[in-house]
Amino acid sequence: MLTLITSSSCASSRKVVAWLKDYNIPFVEKKMHELNFEDLKNILTLTDRGTPELEVRESSSAKEKGEWAKIHKAVIEAPNLEYLIGLIQHHPRHFRTPILFTKNKLSFGYNDNELRSFISRDKRRIMREIASVFEEK
């Protein structure tokens, strides 16, 4: 089952929800503050670089840069996943959304090409066949 972690103030999150509904892909939506131990463990096992992959880029404003650095240090030094979950829940803007994942696929943000990987092969094949019929006409 596809799990989607969203932020209510994130336009990309809304776009991904609409895209998944358009393609009739079943998913479970959770808000960032609902992230749990199992979700985070699953996400981290699918990353190449661990927690840094979850973080947004550092801000350019001095005030936000200082806050970002402080949270980043706490993320890097997090003693356990429960602590990291607390950081994510208290500082959701510091982390990337939306996050889509299954047991073996992970994607951040709204990207058509990456989202297509969540469509089953059979469904993609059928979609190509339908498209080719319309192209012939």
Image (cartoon, rainbow, N blue to C red):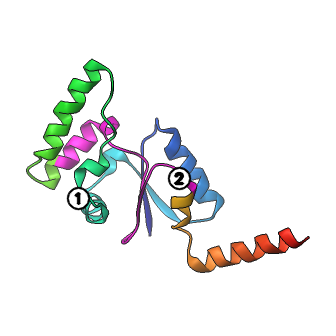
Q: What residue type is labelled 2?
A: Asn
Q: Where's the C terminus, which quadrant?
A: bottom right
In this view, 66 is above or below 13: above
Report x, y in % for residue 86.
Answer: 20, 44
Report x, y in % for residue 73.
Answer: 14, 38
**Residue at (63%, 63%) from the top-left corner?**
23
CA gap, disc 1 and disc 2: 26 Å
Q: Residue 88 carries which label?
A: none
Q: Any magenta on residue 89?
A: yes
Q: Where's the N terminus, which quadrant?
A: bottom left
Q: Residue 111 carries which label?
A: 2
Instruction: Find residue 103 and report its image quarter.
Output: bottom left
Contact flag, marks 1 and 2 (Cβ < 8 Å): no
In this view, 35 is above or below 42: above
Disc 1 vs disc 2: which is toward the camera?
A: 2
Task: Provide the residue designation for mark 1.
Answer: 37
**Residue at (22%, 27%) from the top-left corner?**
67
**Residue at (79%, 73%) from the top-left corner?**
132
Report x, y in % for residue 82.
Answer: 16, 52
Q: Which of 34 and 115 is in front in this view?
A: 115
Q: Is mark 1 on a helix, strand or loop?
A: helix
**Residue at (35%, 46%) from the top-left corner?**
32
Q: What element carries label 2?
A: loop
Name, please, the residue furthest toward the right: 137
Q: Which amino acid does label 1 sit on?
A: Phe
Q: Report the side of 130 relative to 70 (left or right).
A: right
Mark 1 vs mark 2: which is more N-terminal?
Answer: 1
Q: What stretch is highlighted in magenta?
A: 84-112
Q: Any magenta on residue 114?
A: no
Q: Nearer the viewer, residue 60 or 46?
A: 60
Instruction: Find residue 90 and report its image quarter.
Output: top left
